Amino acid sequence: MTQRIFNFSAGPAVLPPEVLEEAREDILNLRGSGIGILEHSHRGKPFMEVRDETERLIRELGEIPEDYHVLFLQGGASMQFSMIPMNFLKAGATADYLVTGHWAKLAAKEAATLGTVHTACSSEDHNFNYIPKNCHISAHPAYAHYTSNNTIFGTQFKSLPNVPASVPLVCDASSDIFSRPIDVSKHALIYAGAQKNLGPAGVTVVIVRDELVKRGAPNLPTMLRYSTYAENQSLYNTGPTFAIYLVGRVCAWIMRNGGLEAMARKNEAKAAKLYNYLDSSKLFRGTAEKESRSLMNVTFVTGNPELDEKFIKEATRNGLDGLKGHRSVGGVRASIYNAFPSAGVDALVQLMRDFEAKHG
Amino acid sequence: MTQRIFNFSAGPAVLPPEVLEEAREDILNLRGSGIGILEHSHRGKPFMEVRDETERLIRELGEIPEDYHVLFLQGGASMQFSMIPMNFLKAGATADYLVTGHWAKLAAKEAATLGTVHTACSSEDHNFNYIPKNCHISAHPAYAHYTSNNTIFGTQFKSLPNVPASVPLVCDASSDIFSRPIDVSKHALIYAGAQKNLGPAGVTVVIVRDELVKRGAPNLPTMLRYSTYAENQSLYNTGPTFAIYLVGRVCAWIMRNGGLEAMARKNEAKAAKLYNYLDSSKLFRGTAEKESRSLMNVTFVTGNPELDEKFIKEATRNGLDGLKGHRSVGGVRASIYNAFPSAGVDALVQLMRDFEAKHG
């Protein structure tokens, strides 16, 4: 593993080295079965045990109530942007969207092609650099949708949005799921592409209340109904078996490392190192408002795009990869998900200090 | 690799050991990048090279004309069952389906929930044990859909179905893609879940004529339009990066081993061993009609379900796994895709001989 470098990619992102080692073994021979995990039938006992274990670990970590399904879908969060309104936004109804970033906006835009959308709040007025304190929920929305962490803009909800308990709350948790405790019972549906905190690209975890699934539109194409997955243990057809396996291995790693409370403490400590330095720096400044700062994606600039680029190049030369900010924010973005090592944050802060000494 | 056993699974299925070894290396460190294939950004240069190489190899192997896209989707063939009529079966039009098995029937059923379907032929009268010689294409169908290999029933089209050249021909090639040469130019769209001949579960390869993509319904949800994938190199959102990588490695393996002509010869030789023995056996008999026999899935029975089960158990004890036939046919199914070794076929034939000597 000595040749590996610090990978600050926003996703797909760094995975725990122990998990990679497990995957290497199981690719040849899954737990003594004589057949690798990639080659096992999705209907056979060895894979069914893997699937069940992944679900069990997700349930344990998330303290997921009995009346919720844990589903494994494909197509990423973008497919959920469509499936949610297709299933739950009936004709004549309105869905509320909290527009706090690029992906939140896309989710709302996709829903608006299928039904009526009400923007409950938006932070677009300041290039999404904050989480609005208030939102204005419409009279009887079909659901309210928010994005718990905004990967591009480096902001994150610190508590649940202020939505009446009677409104089904839907959360895109793609970039912070299982990075901290989450109160599933306050949500009707939580979804997350796995490729940031949970595993590889290619599987979307959906945690959904049974009562909501039952209310889904019945006449949709089979693969676009949540009920198809809920009624078939997500195995109506061949699912992404390896990705489901790997999510299980990552969840087992989270469990071994103390669960979601412990993840939250580690993530707070990692982010604090960066934000504390940013607040003391004369050269770098964070782009997100302080009270909205994400623990997952730390975005910052020097104010001089050429200097930003120089810094990113120097970082790459020093084995710190994936730091280029999204084009809509510019500057630098350090994605420091669960599996990102503290030593990598130290290395980044040190590099920033050195860079500031030279260019400050 | 010594503990690995012969895996006759219908899919996910056996992969070439060399490919598994490559994957093991690249999971830690993709080609010296210091970051594993599972962790690379889908927008970064290392993964883009992987993606481009996978597409290039598919194009070379399939001799795919310039005016076709090679797309990487998710959701398996089942998602294609819906996407195809959603995109191409306009109101008032009819789509023709050649119903030669379980999956073909499901594809037709799914289309029938979205528009008008004409059954151009069916072999359901004999439990799908043959490929009909003739089909009756309707006046001006939007497209004609067939399933080139029927995994469950062990039948396979030996030549293209008899469909007028003016009708866009759509093929579900999930269980025999790249097991033999394929004339892409005669098709408007070919799709295949990767998990039999191409790689792992979790990616669907779609080869589609640009002119058809352009005719797709424009108002569908973003992730359900082929144009979204065609216009964005299949990277509108985060795709199944590892599965795309692995399809590339499998295609490179096919290339190293002589390409599709060589695959066809090997597959014919493997299947011939089994069929020749079946034709000489007094105990076992093939379930598919001779002229419709699949080179990928060899289905057979003793005629006595208890004896079938005894045989399958004995096979499992001898390191031959995954031989249980689908419940709708019963008996035994040996799936012998590209990567299935000839030695495994020899072992199966020997076991059948021994079993016949004991129980014949």
Image (spheres, coloured by chain):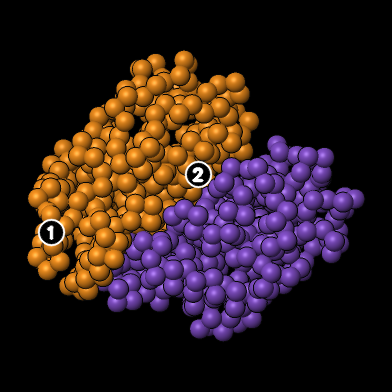
Chain colours: A purple, B orange
Residue B130: x and y in percent read 29, 37
Check the image and report above or below for A44 versus A151: below
What amino acid type should be assigned to the residue bearing mark 1? Answer: Val
Task: Pinpoint residue B97: horizontal percent, then vertical percent.
Answer: 44, 30
Q: Which quadrant would residue A106 be assigned to in this image?
A: top right
Which residue has dot 1 on it?
Answer: B349
Which residue is identified by label 2? B79
In the image, what residue type sits under mark 2?
Answer: Met
In the picture, which quadrant includes the C terminus of chain A? bottom right
Which residue corresponds to the image point at 39% horizontal and 21% vertical from the top-left? B136
Taking the image as shown, residue A91 lies to the left or right of residue B204, namely right
Position of residue A14 in the picture relative to residue A187 (left or right): left
Q: Is residue B132 above or below residue B278?
A: above
Q: Is residue B1 among what the camera can see?
A: yes
Above or below residue B355? Residue B276 is: above
Name the residue at 61% across, 23% down: B91
- Find numbered disc 1 in the image and state the secondary structure of the residue it sits on: helix
Tell me, yes or no, if residue B195 can be seen here: no
Q: CA distance from mark 1 to mark 2?
A: 37 Å
Query: Which chain does tag 1 point to?
Result: B
* Pick the front one: A104 or A85: A85
